[in-house]
Every structure is written in C-alpha cells, then in structure tokens.
Amino acid sequence: MATFISVPLKKSSDLDLVKPLSKYVTSTYPAGEEQGEYIRAVEELNKLRRNALGRPLDKHESSLESLLRYYDQLCAVEPKFPFCENQLCLTFTWKDAFDKGSLFGGSVKLALASLGYEKTCVLFNAAALASQIAAEQNLDNDEGLKNAAKYYQLASGAFAHIKDTVLSALNREPTMDISPETVGTLSIIMLAQAQEVFFLKATTDRMKDAIIAKLSNQAADFYGDAFKQCQYKDNLPKYFYFQEVLPVLAAKHCIMQANAELHQSVLAKHKKHFGEEIARLQHAAELVKTVASRYDEYVSVKDLTEKINRSLTAARKDNDFIYHDRVPELKDLEPIGKATLVKAAAITPPLSQKFADLFEKMVPMAVQQSMSVYSQRKSETVNRLVGTMREATNLCNGVLASLNLPAALEDLSGDSVPPSISEKARSVVQQGGLQSIEQLIKDLPELLTRNREILDEALKMLDDEEATDSELRAKFNQRWNRTASVDLYKPLRSEGANFRNILDKAVQADQVVKDRYNAHCDMIALLCKPESELNAALPSANPAKTLQGSEVVGVLRSQLARLDQVKREREAMESDIKGVTFDMSATFLMALAKDGAISEEQLSVGQLDKLYNEHNQRVQASLRQQEELLGQIQTSHQEFSSLKQSNTEANQREEVLKKLASAHDSYMEISSNLREGTKFYNDLTEILLKFQNKCCDIVFARKTERDELLKELQQSIAREPSAPNFNVPSYQSQPPAPAGGPTPAPRTIFNQAPEQTPDKSQPPARPPPPVLTPPVLTPQTAPAATPPAAAAANPPAVAPPSAAQGPPYPAYQGYPQYFQMPMGYNPYAYGQYNVPYMPYQAAPGQAGYPAAPPATQGYPGYPQQPSQQQNYYPQQ
C-alpha cells in the first residue's frame, strides 16, 4: 500500500555569476581589501550554484543541504545587489519540470532577468528533492517515519511559499510547474503524505483505534482535496505527471477512508454496537473493492482487503447467531472525527544548517541608496556653506578693487609699484601666468568631445537594440512577450538626458570663463611682466607724501587688516566644513531592521542639521562682520579721497591700479574655474564610462534573452500544426464499396475491429459456366454446309462482351512455334477485377477449329445421330 508521490526536479541552464557581479563590485567599491573580499565571495557564490544546479543530485540529505545553502545565500545577497533588467541584468533560464516537450519543439522553458525567479525555482527543486528523499525512507522503523514526515512537511511548506510569492517575484505569467495552482496542489499532496506517515507511525505503535481512525480520516480528507484540485483545474490534467498522480490520489483517498472505517468498527465493537461495526466494515470492504478493481496497477490492497473481509465475516457470524443487532444505513452512522498532526513548514531563511553570509560586510541596497542620497545632501550642504563664503570673499575683493585698496594707501609716493600689486604679480607668475590659462582653455574642448562621444555611443547601443526589439515585436505580435525596450530603457534614457544637459550647461559655463579671460587678458599679461616694465607701464602722479602720517590712513590700514583676518578665518572654516565626517550606515541599518524601511530624508536632514548647525552660525557671523567692515572702509575711503590731491595723472594711475588688482582677482578665479572644469570633465568621463558599461551590459543581456526567445518561438512554431483543421466531406470519409470483387483493407484502421479475411489456404470458388442459349434453327434458315477450307478462312463471329473490360493486362507473346493460351482456360483469372468471361478466339497464324455442325447435321465422318434433340440431364 505504501505508494508515495514524489516531484521531478527542474533543470537550469549554465550561468556565470563571476563576471557581472565582479564587474559591479569593482565599479562600486574602491580598490582595496574590501573589494578583494567581495570578489572572492562572488566566486564562492558561483561555486554554490554549480554545486546545487550544475550536476545530478542524489536523493540524500547532503544534496538537499546544498540546495538550501544556495537558496539562503540568494536571500542574503538579494538586497545587496541591484538585480533588475536595467541595472545588474542576469538572465536565469529554467525548464518546466513536468512538460517533457515534443520531438521537434523541446520542453517549455522560461528565461527572466529576475533573482526572485531564481529563488523560486531553487526552492521548487528543494521541495521536489525533499519529496524524493521522503519517498526513499524505510518506513519500517521509527527513524525512517520521522524523516519522511519531516521532509514531506518541508516540501509542503516550500510549495505553499512559492504559491504565495511567485507572482510578485516574477511580475509575469510563470510556467505551469510553478504556477500558484500547481504548487498549491503539490503542497496539499505533500501534507496528505505526511499525515499518512503519522497514521503509519500510530499503527506501528498500536495506539488506540480512536486516534488511528481520526488520523486516517484526516489523511483521507487531504487526499480528497488534492484529487479535487487536480481534477477541477483546467491546466493540470494535461500533464502526464498529473495523469499518473490522479489514480494514486483517488486510491489513497479510498484506502485512508477504509482504514478509518476499520478502526472505527473496532471502537464500535468495544461499545457493543455490533450493527454499526458491520456497517462500517461493509463500507470499508466496498472502498477496497473499488481500489482493487480500478487502481490495482497503482496500489495493492490485498492485505487490507483480507483483514477487512476476515473482520466482516466474523462480525456477521456473531451478529447472526448471537446479537441480532440491526445494521444501520451508511448515512445514519456518526461521522468519524479528525486529528491533524502535520502542518506546512514555515520558510524563513536561513534554512540550511551551517549558513554563513558571504557578503556579511556589504550593506543592503536600500542602505547603499540611502547612503548615496545622504552623501548628495551632505555635498549640497557643504557646497552651500563654502559657496556662501566664497561669494562674500569675491564681493569683498571687488569692493576693495573698486576703491583701489590697499594700493591707494601704498602708492602715496606715486612713482613706484605698490607692494600689494607687486605681490599679486608674483602670485600670477607663480601659477603659470597666461600660458597656464591658455593651456587649460585649450584642453577643455578635447575633454568635452571625449565625453560627448562616450555618451553618444552608449545611447546608440540603446537605440539599435530598441529598434531590433520593436521590429521583432511587430513581427511576432503577442508572442513577443518580454518587456519592451522602450519601457525598459526609460531610466537609462533619463539618465542619459541628464548627462547631456550637464554637458550643455558645462559648455555655457566654459564660454563665460573664456569671455572673462578675454576681458582681463591685457591686464593679466601686464602682471606677468617684470617689475621694471610694470612700473614703466603705470602712469606717474604727483607725490602725496603729506598723507602718510594722516589719521585716516591709519584707520584704513587697521580696517583692511581686520578684513584680511576675516578672510583667513574663512579659509580655516572652509577646511573645517569639508572635514566633517559621519557614518550613517549604522543609523540606516538600525532603521531598516526596526521598521523594514528607511526614512532617508528625515534621518539625513536631522543628522546634517546637527553636524553643520554650528558651522552655519559661524558663516553667518563672518558675513555680518564683513558687511560692517566694508561699510566702515567705504566711509574712511571717502574721507581719504577728499584729503588726497586729485588731478588727471593721479586718476589715470589709480584707474590702472584698480584694473591690475581686478585682473589678479579674475586670474585667480578663472584659474580655479578652469581647474575645476578640467576635474569635472575627467570625473564625468569615469561616470560616463560606467554608464556606457551599464548600457553595454543590459544590451548584451537583452540580446541573449532575445536569442533565447527566438529559439523558443521557433520551437513553438515547429510544434504547431502546419494547416488548420477542416471538415472532410461525408462522401470522402466512408468511400462506397466497388460493384464487384472484394475491397482491400486500408493500412491503418482506428477504433475498428479487424475484418475477417478468408482462409488463404483455400482457393477462390470456381466461377459457374456461362449459360449459352443456342439459336433455334429451322430448315429455311439453316445455313448451307460450309466447306472445311472456308470454315478455316472465316472463323465464327465473336459476340461483344456484355460487361466492361478489365484492366489492360500486357499480352504475353510466348515463344516461337508456341501458341498463347486463351484466358478462358484459367478459371481463377475470372470473377476478379470485373473481368468478363470471353469467348474463345483463334490465335493469329493458326487455323480455327472446325465449326460445330448445325443441330440437324452431324459431324462429317461420324455416324449420323438421331435428329431429335435430347436433354442434357437425364429425365426423372
């Protein structure tokens, strides 16, 4: 009776995980010990997959452990890598476990770029292997029963987990073996078999009949539910697997119910309900009789039948001779109770015994994304504070340059280069002067062109693949059931459009820098000259030495010194702001573990406010201090200008000094902008190369998926009929029998009994002789005697045949001096193929036989016979 159902394994195509995952690791994490550790973990993950899926698995616990270990690792690695079609695209291909395919089409398979699909299929294999291991257990001992129950419950839980998660994991229609209907049915079957194992355990331990009856009745219910699931689902019975399972489920349902009735009859006997005992045994006998008559080739119930029949015979005998209890109807019997001792195992990773996360140090993708956004928010905060201080410094330098300070205080003699201008000239020369600026400006177009080419090439790959996908989609229509490239590439195209917008803005910024350089080019060139040429280029002015001891000059110098101190403090503040660090990964991990999600904006903004609140206050205080000092300097400068002797030469000299100071400030700003621009283009090149690699990877994955789908479509087309079905006319379906002769039987006859053929050892019946009615001759019409020569020259006339001629058989010419035998001498040649009986014809070259004399004339040379006509047959 112990026939248990197991599930076949799915088969997967080979896939190399090392190359794409290692490429992602190297592009995401900096080179170092951490990156090397992650690459080694990727190689170990690839070994786990090959060990779990790349070889035939034995029906042993070690093979199941390898599957569960790989499944646990997939669950651990899923949140740490961006597995999706438009990022880290890995296409997993699996074949249907039940559909064996056809000779030309092959088995049904599905390829998806989804790690959830890989997890579902691996868990299906784990459940299938658990069912096979359970079916191989020795149920004659407690250890085997315990293991069988454990593995059946594990298989039931795995199938139930797939039923709940497969649609969300795949986001498309799955193959039939992992569809919710199929795995739901398999889960019930595994649960029924686990319940049956507990029934066997209770029977072996000789537990109370009431308990055994309840266990058996519950198992019968499980098998009945599984049978209904298989029978009423439209898609399940078409598989050969389920066609083989259906009889076993029906038989097991009857057997478990019969066992329940048998043990419940024992309980009725103990209660002295002898009529109920007989009724239950009769029902059990009917159940096993049904199994023996319908499902004997699947399940044997010989021992159970004998046991029930013995009990039934004894019960009837005792009741007939002793108790005389009334046997109730089956519908009047009290229902048997149920006891469920099994449940589907909960699938909560880790499932393997010795699991170790290979990527334990790698934070999940949600944390990585939150960290990325946090870094962006932090950069924006730093840039805002630093930018505010730099704008204030530029404003300060512009105001001082417009007032010709501090050069106006240093140029009281009017015949030498002010020390501040000399210092600025040396600073410009030290940084490379005009040559440095011009080289940086010359390099910018080359960097821009390189970045544009990388971006254009990446987008062209997307355009070409999208055009191919659209063409095939228009060709195959609904059969081309993969995600459209137009929809899949939207994030990449948005990212590409963002890069193009950045490049366009960079071009505009480069043009602003170039215009500013052109505006101050002459003054910058003057600053690059030796001090003697610079002094000669400055207009001379009348000395104003009387102002050197003036109070206003001292006030201005004091105010300028305080302003320089504010600038130096800002440089220190800028270094402090850029040096602020805080690791938010622990905060994000804690939030993810607590709530299952990360509120990045709330956490990041709160933390940034704590980190930069003090620095923000210092920046605002610096701005207020600069504003007060500039107001004081402007007031003091007005007083200084009113005391200073004014003339045309002095005004020209002051104007040149202002331009030189402004040229210095512009040079410093232009040089900084160009260096930042160069760094920006170089950094953007690395980003665009990553973007190009991402596009290349997804296009390659899409090409692989396209080839697989094309192959599958070709196979499905090969499985389709070459022409539509059509109705054959009725007169062609059963051809009429020919008018004469037997009809040969066709080569193949479906659903018909073979015709009775005649015994070939007996020859066909001899045809009857032809009936010839000789004409009645009278003396008036009697022909004259024909001489022998004339009779030989004129053979008698031949009557035309009364029926159609037979097939045109070739005439046999015979040998020389031999004559052809007329067909009339072969009695077996006539009567077939509608060949008529032909009268005798003379062969060519041979004289005819003498004609028979008239009835009134005898043969010449023979005695005359009586003239009266005699009957052929004797008269009675």
Image (cartoon, rainbow, N blue to C red):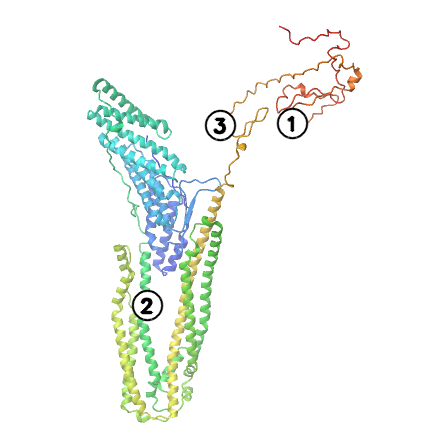
Identify the residue under disc 2: 380
Q: Quadrant of the N terminus?
A: top left
Identify the residue under disc 1: 807
Q: Counting residues from the N terminus, which is met first, the one under dot 1 or under dot 2? A: 2
- Disc 2 marks which amino acid? Glu
User: What's the distance in space between the residues labelled 1 and 2, CA to CA?
Assistant: 104 Å
Q: Quadrant of the C terminus?
A: top right
Image quadrant where residue 248 sits? top left
**How many discs mark residues in the rendered view?**
3
Q: Counting residues from the N terminus, which is met first, the one under dot 2 or under dot 3? A: 2
User: What's the distance in space between the residues labelled 3 and 1, CA to CA?
Assistant: 32 Å
Image quadrant where residue 867 sits? top right
Judging from the image, what secondary structure is the residue with disc 2 in? Answer: helix
- Disc 3 marks which amino acid? Gln
Front one among 297 and 565: 297
User: What's the distance in space between the residues labelled 2 and 3, CA to CA?
Assistant: 87 Å
* Rendered location of residue 615, percent (x, y): 26, 71
Q: Is residue 416 above or below residue 683?
A: below
Q: Is residue 493 above or below residue 555?
A: above
What residue occupies the far front of the structure in this picture?
A: 780
Is residue 163 visible in the rendered image? The answer is yes
- Disc 1 marks which amino acid? Pro
* Rendered location of residue 642, percent (x, y): 31, 91
Specify whether 630 is left or right of 117: left
Mark sitting on residue 59: none
Q: Counting residues from the N terminus, which is met first, the one under dot 3 or under dot 1? A: 3
Badge 1: few (under 14), some or many (20 or more) residues near its Cα, within 10 Å? Answer: few
Judging from the image, what secondary structure is the residue with disc 3 in? Answer: loop
Mark sitting on residue 752: 3
Q: Are marks 2 and 3 in contact (CB under 8 Å)?
A: no
Badge 2: few (under 14), some or many (20 or more) residues near its Cα, within 10 Å? Answer: few
Q: Is residue 143 above or below residue 429?
A: above
